[in-house]
Amino acid sequence: MIVRDDSQRVLLERRPATGVWGGLFSLPEIADDQEAGSWCDAYLNARIARQRTLAPIDHAFTHFDLTIQPTLLDLDAGPAAIMDRPDWLWYKPAMKTKLGLAAPIAALLHEISAQPELNP
């Protein structure tokens, strides 16, 4: 999920130290049977103003292929919940801050910010 607040910040989550993209920041993920709206309500105390499914992204690793199905969620306001999770970060792609991002995630965030139709 690409969770974006009303200030155009995107919620990132640091991945576990081991595994795919270990220690890098990536997008929050939910299970196929979980609803994005209920996740935003439970974890951010925020509601979704607009939800759009974007084109899938294929990424190849040496031993397997990954298909990412991004969903852009624009919140109706900033999150009401106070975040005290050290593995979460609100990131503003336009600031071009140096941050350890997985390459396909960095490309996706750049693509979204460059498409006027995806920006409020």
Image (tube, rainbow, N blue to C red):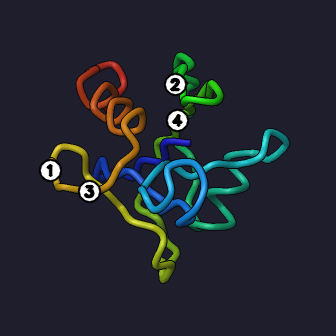
Spatial distance from mark 2 to mark 1, Cα to Cα?
26 Å
Using the numbered discs, state the Cα–Cα distance from disc 3 to disc 1 in whole angstroms: 11 Å
In the picture of the structure, the residue carrying the numbered disc 3 is 99
Marks 2 and 1: which is nearer the front? 2
Horizontal and vertical percent position of residue 42 = 69, 66
Q: Is residue 60 above or below residue 100?
A: above
Residue type of the residue flagged with mark 3: Leu
Q: Position of residue 12 (x, y in %)?
A: 44, 56
- Residue at 62 percent across and 24 percent down: it is 65
Q: Residue furthest front?
A: 62
Residue 109, image quadrant? top left
Q: CA distance from mark 2 to mark 3?
A: 20 Å
Q: Residue furthest right?
A: 33
Local packing at callout 1 (Cα closer than 10 Å; few below 14, some 14-19, many 20+) is few
Q: Give how far apart the Cα atoms at labels 4 and 1 are.
A: 23 Å
Kindly check if marks 3 and 1 are in contact, taking CB atoms under 8 A apart as contact: no
Can you say which quadrant of the picture contains the C terminus?
A: top left
Mark closest to the chain's N terminus, 2 or 4 = 4
Q: Which residue is mark 2?
A: 59
